[in-house]
Amino acid sequence: MMLFNYLLVFLLPLLVTAIPHSTPDDSNNTDTDIDTNANDILTTTSIFSSTISTLKGLDLTSCSLNTTTLNINYNLTALPTPATNLTLQHVALGRGTQNYTCSSPQNTTSKPTSVGALATLFDASCIASVDEELLHHLPALVQGIPLETLDFLATLISLAGAGEGILGEHCFTGNGQPSFDLRFSGDDDWATMKKVASANAPKSVDVPWLKLVEIEGEGIKEVYRVYTAGGVSPATCEGQEGEFEVEYAAEYWFYG
């Protein structure tokens, strides 16, 4: 039931922010506006209830990925398929920041330089095994939750012990290579990776989908970053100075 509990914490803020709230100018609303807001509330509540119903019976510790297959085709966007000798080991919902730097803050033509990323990886294997379409909706939803809320959530989950909701952490090494450490979950899996393929996300505001392969590590041979939400830097360095962050969320699929 731990998976249900932490996803419930995820979804409650989403429900609150999705429901229209009154403002000082709402006194001018017409009956049509009121009816529309009421319908929005009912629709949001219905989706929330349906999602909770789907998640309620999940058990974080007993989900098989044997029949789960990542669909990496979307709007003619595709990445190479996993190596045939590998099997799906984990699926994670990553939430964090893409990090950039600008050396010329007033330069209206220079582009920000990527300096890596930092994200918490929440275990989404059970969701992927039961309802992959539901999983694909979560990155865009979770991206709207403040990082401070997620930091608090991650702290609460960590108190339950290894293997209870948090799969691990994603960061970049000093050499600029993406790294995944899943040992927080009690496994021995970790890897430093390199990018071998990239495909544009369906929306230009979302960072690309990627295929990564292992340089060194244990257990993880390939990683896919897909169904991304956010993370793209501003087009130029105008108004930016030094390092800055752009929040994002994504699915990560681990093969070994």
Image (cartoon, grey):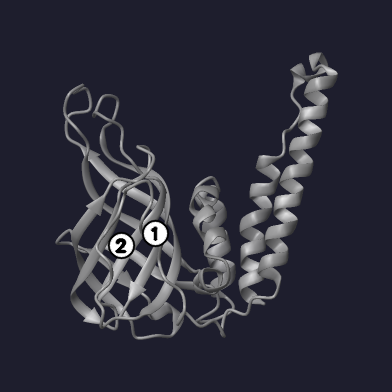
Q: Secondary structure at mark 1?
A: strand
For residue 171, the mark is 2
Do tag 2 and tag 1 residues touch (Cβ < 8 Å)? Answer: yes
The structure residue drawn at horizontal position 69% and vertical position 75%, both measured from the top left corner, is 57
The structure residue drawn at horizontal position 47% and vertical position 79%, both measured from the top left corner, is 67
Viewer-proximal residue among 162 and 86: 86
Q: Residue 35 at what x, y percent from top left?
A: 82, 28
For label 1, count other residues whose C-alpha is less than 10 Å away and answer few (under 14), some (14-19) or many (20+).
many
Give the quarter of the image for residue 200.
top left
Q: Residue 205 at what x, y percent from top left?
A: 37, 38
Give the quarter of the image for residue 164.
bottom right
Provide the residue designation for mark 1. Answer: 119
Is 18 displayed left or right of 146 in the figure?
right
The quadrant of the rendering that contains the C terminus is bottom left
Is 220 displayed left or right of 97 in the figure?
left
* Type of amino acid at the residue the image marks with label 2: Cys
